[in-house]
Amino acid sequence: MALQLQNPILKWIEYRLPVFSTIDHMVGSGYPTPKNLNYLWNFGSLAGIVLVVQIVTGIVLAMHYTPHTSLAFDSVEHIMRDVNYGWLMRYLHANGASMFFVVVYIHIFRGLYYGSYKTPRELLWFIGIIILLAMMATAFMGYVLPWGQMSFWGATVITNLFSAFPFIGDPIVTWLWGGFAVDNPTLNRFFSLHFLLPFVIVGLVMLHLLALHQHGSNNPLGVEKKGPQDTIPFHPYYTVKDLFGLGVFLIFFAYWVFFNPNYLGHPDNYIPANPLVTPAHIVPEWYFLPFYAILRAVPDKLGGVLLMFGAILILFLLPWLDTSRVKSSRFRPIYKQFYWVFVLACIGLLWAGGQPPEGLPLYLSRVCTVYYFAHFLVVMPLVGWFERPRPLPASISEPVLGGGKLPAGAAARGTH
């Protein structure tokens, strides 16, 4: 149904630039959506909102930040102490990065549970993983900008990982550094890329949305829409649902910003960078800890680096590694159990990555790393072959309407 505009000014604009009908088609009443989406589908829109918060606060912070090794740390303190509401912008931006990863990780785990990477949504999944990689690069470079101890040494350790690659490793490290050590050229190029990449992410998000609207959202049943009876307009049903989810999320976000703003950071980053003093325990931000644990689980440097990057790149192979024709884990009793073991393995890696690489944390990181890759390379293909899924509903409407059966009285009334 075409969008009907009553305001003459809006009609004049729409005739020349169909912006309102495009918005209506993307997120309005013109976008038919499966009628059974639950609150886990809120996290896509939440990720978009947090991205906007990050871009706006980042632009404000860039107005007052100085990307120079002699001035960067002091410029951050200047923002905190002297700029009007600078403390709020900085805490929104720093904790917003953590919130961004929280909602995106939940978004990804939801996709894994409900099979959102399967036909016909493979490209949608691929673009999402590329967005994750761009987020990681942006967050890593942003962590370097305050130029505290953990910023400097984190940059030194992570960029040095590329030296593990034979032949091309050392030139890559030299290019990243802009010289022969982490210094002023490194900080300058990291600041430039940290400012640029969020706009690249915006472009990727647009592609993500375009791919999403090609075949519509997946749903908890993993059953494709059979017709209008399986859908409802996105607005107002899911806009209201998203607004409620946003309200709950903002309460959670506000707690970290106003009551615990430094908890998710590292105290050593409030010490100016000193190349002559190495921190006792160098750790990245919490959202990198699972991959850091995988890196340290392997005694060989090159092997650790390959597994760390492989932990993300393997996600591109999921449409082919998962041999089951059933999308949703709701109907896969065996795979569902392995899925929750996988979640526990990721939590174990998260904890082990923040501990010194010795004793129990090292042992746990190795066990969890083995299962992480075994889940994709062994469990998914094998379970898909021998598992007998539960019967799928004939349509989305069938379970939504209580099995598709009307009460006896209603059925009788319907015959008149």
Image (cartoon, grey):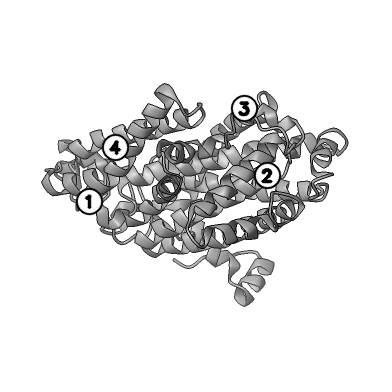
Which residue position holds label 4?
A: 339
Please state which amino acid type lies under the numbered disc 3.
Answer: Ala
Kindly state the secondary structure of the residue where label 4 is placed.
Answer: helix
- Separation of disc 2 and disc 1 at Cα? 50 Å
Which residue is at a point 44% across and 50% down the rendered structure image? 309
Which residue is at a point 52% across and 40% down the rendered structure image? 288
Please state which amino acid type lies under the numbered disc 1.
Answer: Ser
Q: Which labelled disc corresponds to residue 260? A: none
Marks 2 and 1 in Cβ contact (< 8 Å): no
Kindly state the secondary structure of the residue where label 2 is placed.
Answer: helix
Comparing labels 3 and 2, the label whose residue is closer to the camera: 3
Which residue position holds label 3?
A: 280
Which residue is at a point 62% across and 27% down the rendered structure image? 280
Which residue position holds label 2?
A: 144
Q: Which is more N-terminal, label 2 or label 3?
A: 2
Q: Is residue 263 above or below residue 328?
A: above
Q: Which labelled disc corresponds to residue 395? A: 1
Q: Which is more N-terminal, label 4 or label 2?
A: 2
